[in-house]
Amino acid sequence: TTAPVAGAPIVVPATVVSGPGAGGPIMPTGTRRALLIGCNYPKTSCALRGCVNDAVRMRELLRQQGFPDSGIRLLRDDRRTSYTSSAGGELPTKQNIISGLRWLVNGAARGDALFFHFSGHGAQQRDTTGDEADGYDETILPCDFKRTGQITDDDLFKIVVKDLPEGCKLTAIMDCCHSGTGLDLPFNYVQGRGWQCEEVPFHTRGDVQMFSGCEDDQCSADTVQNYQAGGAMTNAFLQALADNPMPLYPDFLAALHRNLKRKGHRQRPQLSSTQRFDLRDRVFHVTEGFVPNHNTTFGVPPGARRTKPVRRRKRRSGGMGLEGMMAAGMGVGILSAFMR
């Protein structure tokens, strides 16, 4: 492969390429496991309303898709009395989220179907490794983030993506602000341009796709639909599948954007992946349609160079995000009803 040019992404045509795992279908094992996280941050200055609802509704979808209750772990913060309560195992604390992520991928094998959904606050913090083009890592905020800190996209990648075996499928939905590259996957799909490779990609063997609630420099909305609070992205996702349970990827992406636009939301969900594939020939389904490994290099390709961060783009969602509001001492409780 050609070494990346500093400051410019690698653009790869949206076609399936041959590779080590290009031959032979992947048969589902029947193992289905999911981690669902809803963080409302109740009784705090950054409280949200619809995140737990999102996780509960996603659980119902997965039950319909054949996920057993024993294979679904739901973390929620609407039933707690304290962080050390007897129900602490169900709280989306930093420790429990990390433990849940490790449980999700533990023993994962070829043909397994895994699912990860996070609904809550997302933020950004300065990148210390040099692998972010804008100089900032994307993060998710556990319910105890003020005490324990944030979870970065680097952390998420190392736990759930890096060592996932070839032929194991993981679908992720991140309904939070700044989530465009929330799992640090190497390939991002750009309409009309195909798959665009990160400047410093880390290639792996697993089959991982992530749908974000918005771009990295945008915010995701916390909204109300049919008299129920929820995330704009989660609502759009569930509505798209209700309208067409077996859509081709282009149709599914178009439905996500259309559903959000109809509700007046400016956020633009993004698709990223560990593998390049032809969207025109693949049906979106959380338990079927496995993609074998097509990457010929694992880890960071030779010649990939870390560069100085590019100038950050101005945020386009009418807000500075949770971390900016907290730093500025603004009324997060007032604004958080509209952004995550």
Image: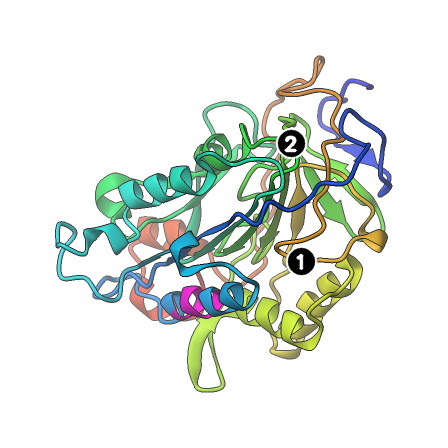
Marks 1 and 2, Cα distance to the nearest angstrom?
18 Å
| Residue position for label 1 | 285
Q: Do the residues labelled 1 and 2 touch (CB within 8 Å)?
A: no
Residue for point 80% across, 51% down: 279
> Helix, strand or loop at disc 1?
loop
Q: In this view, does 309 lie to the left or right of 44?
A: right
| Image spot of residue 170 (x, y percent) | 58, 45
Residue occupying the far bottom of the picture: 227
| Image spot of residue 226 (x, y percent) | 49, 86
The overriding secondary structure of the stretch rendered in magenta is: helix
Residue for point 78% across, 61% down: 248
| Image spot of residue 290 (x, y percent) | 70, 45
- Where 338 sits versus 203, above or below? below
Quadrant position of residue 335: bottom left
> Helix, strand or loop at disc 2?
loop
Residue 182 in view, yes or no: yes
The residue segment tinted magenta is: 53-58
- Where 241 sits versus 211, above or below? below
The amino acid type of the residue labelled 1 equals: His
Point out the tag, 1 or 2, that comes first from the N-terminus: 2
Q: In this view, does 339 lie to the left or right of 247?
A: left
- Where 95 sits versus 43, above or below? above
| Image spot of residue 30 (x, y percent) | 57, 50
Residue for point 53% across, 47% down: 31
The amino acid type of the residue labelled 2 equals: Glu
Graded by Cα atoms within 10 Å as few (under 14), some (14 to 19) or many (20 or more), the crowding at tag 1 reads some
Closer-to-camera residue (24/44): 24
Closer-to-camera residue (275/130): 275
Closer-to-camera residue (234/163): 163
Q: In this view, does 7 lie to the left or right of 91?
A: right
Check the picture and name the quadrant holding the C terminus. bottom left
| Residue position for label 2 | 166
